[in-house]
Structure formats: structure tokens, C-alpha cells
């Protein structure tokens, strides 16, 4: 309710271009003028510069650059993003969302910064201001052996959003998105399941957007700003990403698994390429990435002539920059 009222206030102020009376805002939002005043104060606390003059009303001077719910909504979605929680900073959006796993699916937690962002194998994922750091709660009816599809639809949504801002993005097994061979996004899916069924999953997504790659102090990474030479509208990109993820989730719920796998194969950066794959145990194999199994395993024609399917591990292109 509070979010809806503030969204109405902002829509009215942005659309007016001048002052809007408290009475008009009260009528549009369906709350009292006192409530309007309180909501305006809360918006000011969140960084909105709003000027008020007795007898004239309110005027919006400037909006913050934050990914606040009422900046992202309304969204054209069925599930993902029906509710959004915004945080200025957090240890980890995934860990925060774990505490809300009992809520309805589609809940999105989005933060301006993460202090303890994690990638696969507990690696540190630096998350400074200017990125898109978000986690999504989903509760699909899905066999555990198809859990890869959750990472796949995330990678597809992200790569499409990057393409929308002018970048040629590709997916890399098991859960990375690359631009010109450099990692621009990471995906971390935590799955809670029993027997052979997924109970819920939390998908963490981190996209490097409006900062330079020099801020990351890592090799072979990049950012949207570094690739384009300019910043992009982060709010529009976040909206687009959420809507695309919702679209792919609909495909998943309809059981169109082959459509997802085929789309992933089409966008793959490694199929047909010479790669090195390192298993969690430390074993290393060299060979050609030959395909993707129905369960999301990477099929590799190894140097010893054997064809192996890897369920987990790190794949590296031999000619990565």
C-alpha cells in the first residue's frame, strides 16, 4: 500500500512539470492530505528533492538514481517482481532473501551495494554502487535434475537485457554471461529441495553496470560502462531484466525445457570451442565443448578421446582474453 501511494505521488509530480496540490494528490492516491505529507517526507528521506509551497502544493526537483520499487514499477510481469524490496546496502541479497523464503514467489530483493557478495564456490563478488545486485525467490514445480534451467533462464534474460543496451552478450557454462570474452555478470542459484523436487530457489544476479572495470581489481572482467564508454539508464535496464526473467520463467513453468536449452545453446560462448574444465576436486580436463545435456551437463570431447559429461566445475576458454 505504502509503495503504491508513493508511486502515485511520483507519477503525478513527474507528469505535471510544476506544482501539484495536496488535494489533487490525495484524490489520486485515495488517502488523506496528512498521509500525503507523510509519504512526501518519506520520499525526501529516500533522496527525492521535493519542494513544497503552501497554497501551491508539491514539485519534484530531482529523483535519486536508486532502484527503488516505485521507480521500477509498474512492471509487465506475472510472477517475478510482483513485490520488490530495496536496500541501500546489505551483506548479501541472497542471504537476506533466505530469511524470507516462506513468502510468495516472485519476491525480488535489490540493493545498491553488497558488502559480502558471493559467486560460485564461495568466491568473492565485488558489488560496488552502480551495479544491479538482486536476488529472486522462485518456487517452480521442477525436478532437481532440471535445476540447471533456473540458471539458464537467468543467463538468457541477462544476455537479452545487455543486448538491449547495445552489447553482444554470450552465456558460458555453468552460469556466467560474457561480453567480448570477459565476465560481465555472475549468477548464483541456491536450491532447497528434497528427494527429487525443488522446494524453492533463490537466484542471485550481479551485473556490472555503471562503473569502470578498474574498480573490480579482477582479471578478465568487464562492465557495461567500460564496454560502451558511457553510463546507461540503470532503472530501465533493471526493469527490462526483471520483465525478461519473468518471461523466461513463464516458459519454464509451461514445461518448454527444450526451448530454454536451445536458446542457451544458441547464445553459448563455449560450444564448439577448445576449453579447460576444472572439477571441484581439482581434476583438470582439456577438450572441445561438444554439447549440453538435457539436465544441463556440459558434454566435452576430451583429449584422451573420451566423451564426458560434467555436472559441475569451471570451464575456461583456452583463448580467453
Image (cartoon, rainbow, N blue to C red):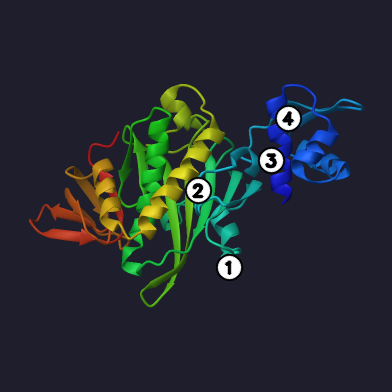
What residue is disc 1 on?
Answer: 102
Which residue lies at the image location 45% right of the left edge and 50% below the top edge?
Answer: 246
Mark count: 4
In the depicted structure, whether residue 195 falls above or below residue 202:
below
Q: Residues within 10 Å of mark 3 (few under 14, many from 20)?
A: many
In the rendering, at what x and y percent does residue 294 appear? 24, 60
In three-dimensional space, the C-alpha distance between marks 2 and 3, rounded to whole angstroms, equals 17 Å
Pick whichever, 11 or 273, lies toward us: 11
**What SS does tag 1 mark?**
loop
Residue 164: image quadrant is top left
In three-dimensional space, the C-alpha distance between marks 1 and 2, rounded to whole angstroms, equals 21 Å
What residue is disc 4 on?
Answer: 13
Residue 280: image quadrant is bottom left
In the depicted structure, whether residue 77 falls above or below residue 140:
above
Quadrant of image for the C terminus = top left
> Does the CB distance between marks 2 and 3 fall below 8 Å?
no
**What SS does tag 4 mark?**
helix
Labels 3 and 1: the sequence-earlier one: 3
Which residue lies at the image location 68% right of the left edge and 32% below the top edge?
Answer: 64
Disc 1 or disc 4, which is closer to the eye?
4
Which residue lies at the image location 34% right of the left edge and 69% below the top edge?
Answer: 143
Say whether residue 321 is left or right of residue 32: left
In three-dimensional space, the C-alpha distance between marks 3 and 1, rounded to whole angstroms, equals 26 Å
**What SS does tag 3 mark?**
helix
Labels 1 and 4: the sequence-earlier one: 4
In the rendering, at what x and y percent does residue 125 appear? 49, 47
Say whether residue 196 is left or right of residue 265: right
What residue is disc 3 on?
Answer: 7
Labels 1 and 2: the sequence-earlier one: 2
In the depicted structure, whether residue 82 falls above or below residue 231:
below
Amino acid at each position: 500500500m505504502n509503495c503504491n501511494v508513493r508511486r502515485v505521488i511520483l507519477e503525478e509530480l513527474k507528469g505535471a512539470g510544476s506544482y501539484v496540490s495536496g488535494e489533487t494528490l490525495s484524490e489520486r492516491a485515495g488517502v488523506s492530505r496528512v498521509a500525503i505529507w507523510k509519504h512526501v517526507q518519506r520520499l525526501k528521506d529516500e533522496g527525492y528533492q521535493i519542494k513544497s509551497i503552501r497554497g501551491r502544493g508539491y514539485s519534484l526537483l530531482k529523483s535519486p538514481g536508486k532502484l527503488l520499487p516505485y521507480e521500477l514499477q509498474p512492471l509487465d510481469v506475472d510472477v517475478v517482481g510482483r513485490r520488490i524490496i530495496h536496500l541501500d546496502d546489505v551483506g548479501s541479497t541472497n542471504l537476506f532473501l533466505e530469511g524470507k523464503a516462506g513468502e510468495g514467489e516472485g519476491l525480488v530483493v535489490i540493493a545498491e551495494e553488497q558488502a559480502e557478495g558471493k559467486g560460485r564456490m564461495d568466491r568473492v563478488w565485488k558489488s560496488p554502487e552502480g551495479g544491479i545486485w538482486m536476488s529472486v525467490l522462485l518456487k517452480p514445480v521442477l525436478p532437481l535434475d532440471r535445476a540447471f534451467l533456473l540458471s539458464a533462464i537467468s543467463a538468457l534474460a541477462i544476455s537479452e537485457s545487455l543486448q538491449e543496451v547495445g552489447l553482444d552478450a554470450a552465456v558460458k557454462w555453468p552460469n556466467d554471461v560474457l561480453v567480448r570474452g570477459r565476465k560481465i555478470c555472475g549468477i548464483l542459484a541456491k536450491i532447497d529441495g528434497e528427494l527429487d523436487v525443488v522446494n524453492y530457489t533463490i537466484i542471485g544476479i550481479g551485473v556490472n553496470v555503471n562503473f569502470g572495470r578498474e574498480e573490480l581489481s579482477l582479471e578478465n572482467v568487464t562492465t557495461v560502462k567500460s564496454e560502451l564508454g558511457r553510463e546507461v539508464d540503470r532503472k530501465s535496464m533493471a526493469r527490462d531484466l526483471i520483465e525478461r526473467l519473468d518471461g523466461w520463467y513463464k516458459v519454464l513453468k509451461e514445461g518448454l525445457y527444450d526451448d530454454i536449452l536451445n536458446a542457451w545453446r544458441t547464445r553459448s560462448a563455449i560450444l564448439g570451442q577448445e576449453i579447460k574444465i576444472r572439477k571441484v576436486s581439482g581434476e583438470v580436463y582439456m577438450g572441445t565443448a561438444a554439447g549440453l545435456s538435457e539436465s544441463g551437463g556440459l558434454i566435452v570431447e576430451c583429449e584422451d578421446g573420451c566423451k564426458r559429461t560434467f555436472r559441475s566445475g569451471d570451464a575456461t576458454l583456452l583463448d580467453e582474453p
